[in-house]
Image (cartoon, coloured by chain):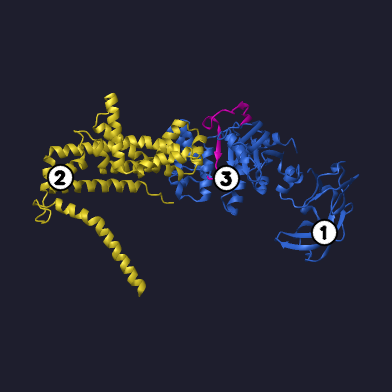
Amino acid sequence: MSDSTPAVTREAAETAAADGGAPPREASSIRLEGLHKRFGRDTVALDGVDLTIEAGEFFTLLGPSGCGKTTLLRILAGLEEPNDGRLLIGGRDVTDTPPHRRSVNTVFQSYALFPHLSVRDNLAFGLRMRGESAAERERKVAEVAEFIQLGSLVERRVDQLSGGQKQRIALARALVCEPDVLLLDEPLSALDAGLRSQLQVELQRLQKRLGMTFVFVTHDQDEAMVMSDRIAVLDGGVIQQVGTPSEVYEHPANAFVARFMGHDNLFAITAVDGDRVETRLGRLRLDPAEQRAESDGWLLIRPETLVLGDTLPAGYNRLEGTVEERLYRGSRIEYRLAVNGQPLMVVASNLGQRMHAVGDRVVIGVCPEDLVRVAA
Amino acid sequence: MRKRTLNRGLAGFWWLTLAFLYLPLAVVVLFSFNSVNSAAHFADVSLRWYHQLLGNEQILSAFRNSLILAIVSSVIALVIGCLIGYGMYRHRHRKLGWLIVLIYLPIVLPDIVFGISEMAFFVQINRATGLLEPGLGTMIIAHVTFQIPFVALIVYSRFVGLDPTLFEAAKDLYASPFKRALHFLIPTLKPALISAFFLSFTLSIDDFVISFFTAGPESATLPIYIWGAIKKGVTPEINAIASLMIGAVLLAALVSLLFNRPRRR
């Protein structure tokens, strides 16, 4: 899985060819080397970031607010200068290049559409500043308006647009410049849930079709997993993990990443004995691949891997607990159990079996292959 | 019952206030159309005094001076005030305490103090260097100084109302600093600039005290002319000038208001 990135680019090219869409454009890779950024004397926003983003990748910077993801994006755009380190786009050092000379465009969180201009003039702004001819501008704006299906809006004023329309115009205004890299700063955070998930899919398709390098910033791990080829999880100005969505979700590099990806079932490992680990849940057998001699760190049990029932498949770990809480979610049922006094979350698909009631005594099966050791 | 009486009382008070504000103006305008030379008796409607105005070389010259002074000083104040307003916006996160006070001070300083100090200052410079002979030049400098704070504040407040990421979007979309000014800052500020210009214009046309202290023998403005003429008694000619000035100032104030209205969402 770790060498999946070049394949992604190939895939993008193939998809583009198969769609009969635009041929993949000259996408650019990004290299960050030892980036440091401080604000004032003692606020450290980035504390030594090394990262390579492949050409044509949909790459997401994920983390809580204040983790440095937006600062990193602003350094890529040229809106912020690093105190230390280098930034290369397409192999060229652009650390000291001002934003208006970088082939990078940004979709801002607030959209930042110019209120004094019509939608058409907003779309043409970048082309105009780059000195492209009126005819060329006209053609490209018409093309991009068609592309995002907002051709009917070009004469409107910006304050006559809905949130979703503004979002698309902001995207189109950046895309029409055909940059090497497109930066997206939480562009969906202001939209309601329905529109948001629709645009997540659209954005991802669009990126595959254009083959452009996208760098996407979000604090929403679901959004990051749905859209990205790879994710970098940041905290405290440091990259905690870089990997594909499944790598980051299933094999978080440390407890922070695990918690941030939404995992509740983390249990401190107190002792190790061969292929068994001791936790406050009890002794559990691990897959040999997860065996390590150190008796530290955490054991991650994903709630969707747990099985409730009296008869367990061979080789499963067996735990017993009591149902403390039950949340009915339609497609699935979430149970909060107490196992040896420890809370344990279980997510069961709603397959029409008997539901367990609060207070029921249940047997829990834990497959050794689904247990993951997580560093502290 | 008591509430209705109170409301009626308040309404009456409102109309009384309006009357004290605008009836004197109405009287001046009315008597400027009087056919006879009387401030007490209105005979007939006539444009006699307006005709007489046009024949009065002193009045025409004062009118010309007022106009030149207002336009030139407003243009200069607009440029300088804009730069100050932009500077205040750019550095708004810093502590600007005393600097802001320096910019605001001319607004609250009594005109008479301001006028006397300007005069004393110009006289000193004139004596030392021979420059700044009292006249339109000194008046323009004086007017610019009291117009600047108004322009700076209007421009500053317009900037503060903007989404700060717009500046970044302009950079991100390949606009060099010069193109940012030309294609983003100036168009975005246009309403505020027009508004600030007309406000400066109004303040200048309106000003008597500061003009009086900084004027030279040849540079009497309309207010200064009126002040001089009134010593010989109020003539209907003065009423006519006053009426024209009321009209001009109302127009300028209206334009200023129209362009500084918040944009509808």
Give the labeled residue for mark 3.
Answer: A187
Give the labeled residue for mark 2.
Answer: B231
List x then y, in percent, for residue A329: 70, 60
Where, quadrant-wise, is the C terminus of chain A in this rendering? top right
Residue at 65% in and 39% down? A59
As rendered, which of A107 and A46 lies closer to the eye? A46
Please tell me if label 3 and label 1 are on a single chain: yes
Say if residue B205 shows up in the picture.
yes
Give the labeled residue for mark 1.
Answer: A341
As rendered, which of B128 and A199 lies closer to the eye? B128
Residue type, label 1? Gly
SS for tag 3?
loop
Is B44 left or right of B158, judged from the image as shown? Answer: left
Alpha-carbon span between mark 2 and mark 1: 100 Å
Q: Hue of chain B?
A: yellow
The chain to which mark 1 is attached is A
- Residue A86 falls inside the magenta stretch: yes
Give the chain ID for the blue colour: A
Is A84 left or right of A336, judged from the image as shown? Answer: left
Residue type, label 2? Lys
Of all residues shown, which one is farthest toward the top?
A: B129
SS for tag 1?
loop
Say if residue A19 shows up in the picture.
no
